[in-house]
C-alpha cells in the first residue's frame, strides 16, 4: 500500500532512530536498487553540473583551491565558499578578495590542464566585522563582491546555547583551544549575536542588511537562527521582495523545522537547503526521511549542498555526490536531483 508522502514526513520527520527496522528496510532497498557510473578517481562522477552553495574551506579544513580543481575535473558547475582560509585577514583582503585569488590560480591551472574551471563565489558571515560597525562591514564586503550573506552562525546566541563555543570569544578565557558547555540562554544572549529586539522584530542593523541584500540581489542565509528569528527574517524577505533567501540544514538541531514550518517558509519564497551534514554519521538523519520531506515540499524551493570541509566529512565533491546519490536512490528522479542541485542553486547565484 502506498503511503502518503506528507503523512510519512510528518510522522517520521527528525526521528531517525525511532524505527530502526524501517530504516534498515529503506536503506537496504535503496542501496541494492541504486546504480551509478563506476567511480574513476581523481575525478568524481555523479556531480556533473552541480553547484554547491555551502562549501567550507577555512583554516584546518579542505584546501579551497584543491577542492575547486577537483570540482572542475568532475564537471561541477561551481562552489560558493561560506568560509575560506584567510577570510579573517584585514578588511582589504576579505573573503571576496581571497576567492578572487582562488579564481586566478584556478584559471592558471585550467590553462595548463585544459580542464574547464568551475565558477567560484564568496560569502560573508555577519559577525565578521573586524571592529567595524555591522552595517558598515556588510556594505564593505558587498562592495567588494561577495555573492552571499550569512546571518550569525558560529557566534549566534542560538549556537552558543546549543553547543557552546570558545570562551576566548567573550573574554571568558585566554586559551584558544578551550570550549565551553552549552550556555544558558540568558548568557548566550549577552555574549552571542541575536537579530531580534525586545519586541521580537529585527534590529535596525539587520533590517538594513536585508535591505542591502534586496538592493544588490544577492543570496542571504538565515544561518543558525532561532525559530523566532527565522520567521521574522522570512517576513522581511516577503516585504522586500527578496528572491534569494535560504534556510540551511533544516533538519539540524540548530534549526529543527517541522514539515509545516518548511511549507510556510517555502510559501514566503524561502529555499530549504538540505545538506550532507544532516545525513552524515555526525547527525544521522535518515536519508529516506529527507527524501520524502523534499517530495512533500516539492522541488521548486529546495536545494542540496555539502556543508562539508571538516576533516571528519568527505570532501565537498564527494559529499555532494553522496547526497545526490542518496536522494536519487531513495526516490527523487534524476530530473528532480538536477533541479535541486543545479538549477535552483544556479538561480541563487544568477546562473541561467
Image (tube, helix red, strand yellow):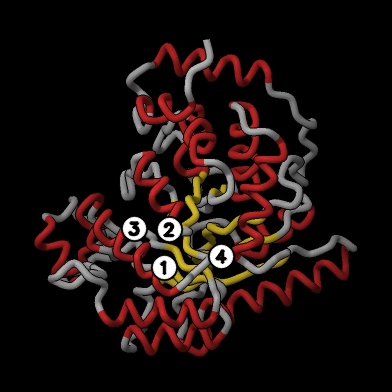
In-front residue for pair 34/199: 199
Q: Are marks 4 and 2 in contact (CB under 8 Å)?
A: no
Q: Quadrant of residue 28?
A: top right
Q: Which residue is mark 4?
A: 81
**Which callout, 3 or 4, points at the residue further toward the start of the chain?**
4
**Which callout, 2 or 1, points at the residue further toward the start of the chain?**
1
| Mark 4 residue element | strand
Q: Which residue is mark 2?
A: 268
Q: Residue at x 54, y 19 (%)?
A: 27
Q: Which residue is mark 3?
A: 224
Q: Are marks 2 and 1 in contact (CB under 8 Å)?
A: yes
Rendered location of residue 75, percent (x, y) = 78, 52
Q: Nearer the viewer, mark 4 or mark 2?
A: 2
Which quadrant is home to the C terminus? bottom right
Q: Quadrant of residue 189?
A: bottom left
**Which callout, 4 or 2, points at the residue further toward the start of the chain?**
4
Q: Nearer the viewer, mark 3 or mark 4?
A: 3
Rendered location of residue 230, percent (x, y) = 32, 59
**Which callout, 1 or 4, points at the residue further toward the start of the chain?**
4
**Which callout, 3 or 1, points at the residue further toward the start of the chain?**
3
Separation of marks 4 and 2 at Cα, in angstroms? 26 Å
Q: Residue at x 54, y 51 (%)?
A: 301
Separation of marks 3 and 4 at Cα, in angstroms? 17 Å
Q: Nearer the viewer, mark 3 or mark 2?
A: 2
Q: Image check: 90 left or right of 324?
A: left
Q: Which mark is residue 237?
A: 1
| Mark 3 residue element | loop
Q: Nearer the viewer, mark 3 or mark 1?
A: 1
Amino acid at each position: 500500500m502506498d503511503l502518503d508522502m506528507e503523512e510519512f514526513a510528518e510522522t517520521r520527520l527528525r526521528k531517525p532512530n525511532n524505527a530502526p527496522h524501517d530504516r534498515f528496510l529503506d536503506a537496504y532497498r535503496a542501496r541494492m536498487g541504486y546504480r551509478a557510473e563506476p567511480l574513476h578517481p581523481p575525478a568524481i562522477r555523479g556531480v556533473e553540473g552541480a553547484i554547491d552553495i555551502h562549501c567550507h574551506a577555512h583554516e584546518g579544513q579542505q584546501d579551497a583551491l584543491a577542492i575547486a580543481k577537483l570540482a572542475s575535473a568532475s564537471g561541477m558547475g561551481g562552489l560558493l565558499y561560506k568560509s575560506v582560509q584567510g577570510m579573517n585577514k584585514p578588511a582589504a583582503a576579505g573573503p571576496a578578495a581571497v576567492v578572487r585569488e582562488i579564481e586566478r590560480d584556478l584559471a592558471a591551472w585550467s590553462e595548463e590542464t585544459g580542464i574547464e574551471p568551475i565558477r567560484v563565489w564568496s560569502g560573508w558571515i555577519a559577525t565578521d566585522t573586524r571592529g567595524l560597525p555591522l552595517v558598515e562591514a556588510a556594505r564593505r564586503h558587498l562592495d567588494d563582491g561577495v555573492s552571499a550573506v550569512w546571518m550569525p552562525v558560529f557566534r549566534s546566541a542560538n549556537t552558543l546555547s546549543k553547543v557552546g563555543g570558545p570562551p576566548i570569544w567573550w573574554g571568558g578565557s585566554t586559551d584558544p583551544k578551550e570550549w565551553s558547555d552549552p550556555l544558558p540562554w540568558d548568557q548566550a544572549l549577552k555574549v552571542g549575536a541575536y537579530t531580534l529586539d525586545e519586541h521580537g522584530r529585527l534590529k535596525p542593523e539587520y533590517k538594513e542588511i536585508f535591505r542591502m541584500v534586496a538592493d544588490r540581489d544577492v543570496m542571504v542565509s538565515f544561518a543558525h537562527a532561532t525559530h523566532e528569528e527565522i520567521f521574522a527574517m522570512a517576513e522581511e524577505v516577503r516585504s522586500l521582495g527578496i528572491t534569494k533567501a535560504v534556510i540551511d540544514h533544516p533538519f539540524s538541531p540548530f534549526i529543527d523545522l517541522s514539515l509545516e514550518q518548511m511549507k510556510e517558509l517555502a510559501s514566503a519564497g524561502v529555499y530549504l537547503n538540505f545538506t550532507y551534514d544532516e545525513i552524515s554519521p555526525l547527525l544521522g538523519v535518515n536519508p529516506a526521511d529527507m527524501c520524502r520531506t523534499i517530495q512533500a515540499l516539492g522541488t521548486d524551493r529546495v536545494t542540496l549542498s555539502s556543508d562539508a570541509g571538516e576533516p571528519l566529512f568527505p570532501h565537498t565533491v564527494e559529499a555532494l555526490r553522496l547526497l545526490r546519490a542518496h536522494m536519487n536512490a531513495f526516490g527523487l528522479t534524476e530530473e528532480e536531483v538536477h533541479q535541486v542541485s543545479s538549477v535552483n542553486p544556479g538561480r541563487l547565484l544568477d546562473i541561467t
